[in-house]
Image (cartoon, rainbow, N blue to C red):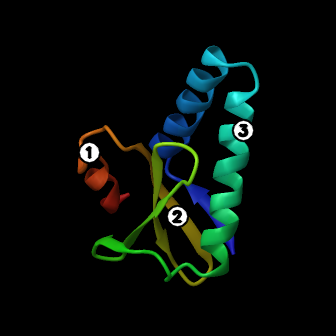
């Protein structure tokens, strides 16, 4: 199964890692490791997490206030958003058509 990030989700990931790196040395790298671990966990059982819209599911990161919103398909895992918990909840819905 391959992982495909929506371009805006990839930008969210990069911006969050940069933010954490500026706050505490090494924290941005820890954030990226947490994301990688989360993606591996999702890939092991993609239907395990709560559905939030149609076929979109949400995985909550344990250490950081972020969620990964994704769509599992037979051959790939599509990451639609790397969403901070304080962001407006539905901002990513426009990505469903991409």
Q: Quadrant of the N terminus?
A: bottom right
Mark found first going from the N terminus, 2 or 3: 3
**Separation of marks 1 and 3 at Cα, in angstroms:** 26 Å
User: Toward which corner of the image does residue 4 lie, by quadrant?
Assistant: bottom right
Query: From this viewpoint, which residue is outermost toward the top?
Result: 22
Mark found first going from the N terminus, 1 or 2: 2
Mark found first going from the N terminus, 1 or 3: 3
Mark 2 vs mark 3: in front:
3
2 and 3 marks in contact (CB < 8 Å) = no
> Which mark, by number, is residue 8?
none
Q: Quadrant of the C terminus?
A: bottom left
**Separation of marks 1 and 2 at Cα, in angstroms:** 17 Å
Label 1 SS: helix
> Which mark, by number, is residue 30?
3
Label 2 SS: strand
Label 3 SS: helix
Name the residue located 55 percent from the left edge and 78 percent from the top edge: 46
Please give the residue where the numbered disc 2 appears in the rendered image.
Answer: 78
> Which mark, by number, is residue 91?
1
Q: In this picture, is 35 found above or below 23? A: below
Mark 1 vs mark 3: in front:
3
Locate residue 80, reporting x and y percent: 44, 55
Lateral position of residue 2 relative to residue 15, left or right: right
């Amino acid at each position: 199964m391959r992982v495909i990030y929506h371009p805006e989700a990839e930008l969210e990931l990069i911006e969050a890692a940069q933010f954490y790196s500026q706050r505490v040395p090494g924290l941005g790298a820890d954030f990226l490791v947490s994301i990688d671990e989360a993606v591996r966990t999702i890939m092991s059982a993609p239907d395990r997490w709560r559905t939030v819209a149609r076929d979109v599911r949400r995985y909550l990161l344990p250490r950081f206030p972020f969620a990964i919103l994704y769509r599992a398909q037979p051959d790939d895992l599509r990451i639609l958003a790397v969403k901070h918990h304080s962001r407006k909840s539905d901002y990513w819905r426009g990505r469903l058509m991409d």
